Image (cartoon, rainbow, N blue to C red):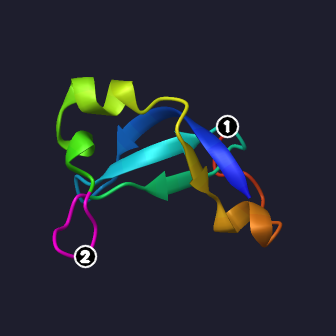
Amino acid sequence: MQQPIVGYHKDDEDHWVAKLACGHNQHVRHQPPWTERPWVITEAGRRSRLGLELGCVKCDRGEPRDWH
């Protein structure tokens, strides 16, 4: 299910995590060549992607929210 990004935070390992409108979290790493997300490196880049929809597998599986 597609869900928009509403914010970000860093996890315990200093990786960026997107907060989705559904209440789930999803890592948004930039780890070339596997994952190309150079926008996550800067604050302006992350801000520019607010509202971007990501596929939420937790919604697809019916999992409870990560945050409220």
Please name which of the two marks, 2 or 1, marks the residue nearer to the observer.
Answer: 2
- What label sits on residue 34 in the rendered view? 2
Q: Main secondary structure of the magenta part?
A: loop
User: What residue do we see at 26% from left, 43% from top?
Assistant: 40
Badge 2 marks a residue whose secondary structure is loop
Q: Give the x, y percent position of residue 38.
A: 20, 48
First to last magenta residue range: 30-36
- Residue that sits furthest to the right in the current view: 62
Q: Is residue 12 left or right of residue 49?
A: left
Badge 2: residue crowd in 10 Å (few <14, some 14–19, many ≥20): few
Query: Would residue 26 be found to the left or right of residue 4 on screen?
Result: left
Q: Can the viewer see residue 25 in this picture? A: yes
**Residue 21: mark:** 1
- Which residue occupies the foreground of this view, 42 or 9? 42
Residue visible at 18% across and 42% down in the picture? 41
Q: What residue do we see at 66% from left, 68% from top?
A: 57
Between residue 9 and residue 57, name the one nearer to us: 57
Q: Secondary structure at mark 1?
A: loop
Q: Position of residue 27 (x, y in %)?
A: 41, 58
Occupied quadrant, residue 32: bottom left
Q: Quadrant of the N terminus?
A: bottom right
| Front in this rendered view, residue 65 or 5 | 5
Is 33 placed above or below 44 here?
Answer: below
Count neighbours of disc 1 (C-alpha within 10 A) and say few if under 14, some if 14 to 19, many if 20 or more. some
Horizontal and vertical percent position of residue 2: 68, 52
Asked if the magenta segment contains residue 32, the reply would be: yes
Q: Where does residue 19 sit, x and y in percent of width and height?
A: 53, 41
Which amino acid is tagged 2? Trp
